[in-house]
């Protein structure tokens, strides 16, 4: 349960981060953009995998 809550909060944090950087994202250099994108992917993938596994394994 804590894992699901933490993943959900991380996912919301990434969404807020990307929304707040919407205007400033163009001014970041390549390594900063890559860091934000990889962090977003690192948070979203476990969240999606956990959600999919939860629906598949729920009997």
Image (cartoon, rainbow, N blue to C red):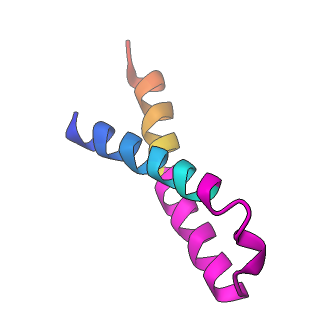
Residue 59, image x, y percentages: 38, 12
- Residue 40: name its quadrant: bottom right
36 relative position to 51: left or right: right
The one nearer the camera, 46 or 17, is: 17
Q: Residue furthest right?
A: 26
Residue at horizontal 51 percent and vertical 32 percent from the top: 52
Image quadrant where one finds the N terminus: top left
Count of number-bearing discs: 0
Residue 8, image x, y percentages: 40, 40
The one nearer the camera, 45 or 27, is: 27
Residue 20, image x, y percentages: 60, 57
The one nearer the camera, 48 or 37, is: 37
Residue at horizontal 41 percent and vertical 28 percent from the top: 54
The residues colored magenta run: 19-45
Residue 17, image x, y percentages: 54, 58
Residue at horizontal 42 percent and vertical 39 percent from the top: 50
Vertical comparison of 3 with 39: above or below:
above
Vertical comparison of 15 with 27: above or below:
above
Vertical comparison of 37 with 52: above or below:
below
Q: Is residue 37 magenta?
A: yes
Vertical comparison of 34 with 29: above or below:
above
Residue at horizontal 70 percent and vertical 70 percent from the top: 24
Main SS category, magenta section: helix
């Amino acid at each position: 349960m804590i894992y699901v809550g933490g993943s959900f909060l991380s996912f919301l944090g990434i969404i807020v981060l990307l929304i707040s950087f919407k205007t400033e994202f163009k001014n970041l250099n390549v390594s900063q953009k890559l860091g934000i994108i990889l962090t977003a992917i690192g948070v979203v993938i476990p969240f999606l995998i956990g959600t999919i596994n939860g629906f598949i394994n729920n009997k």
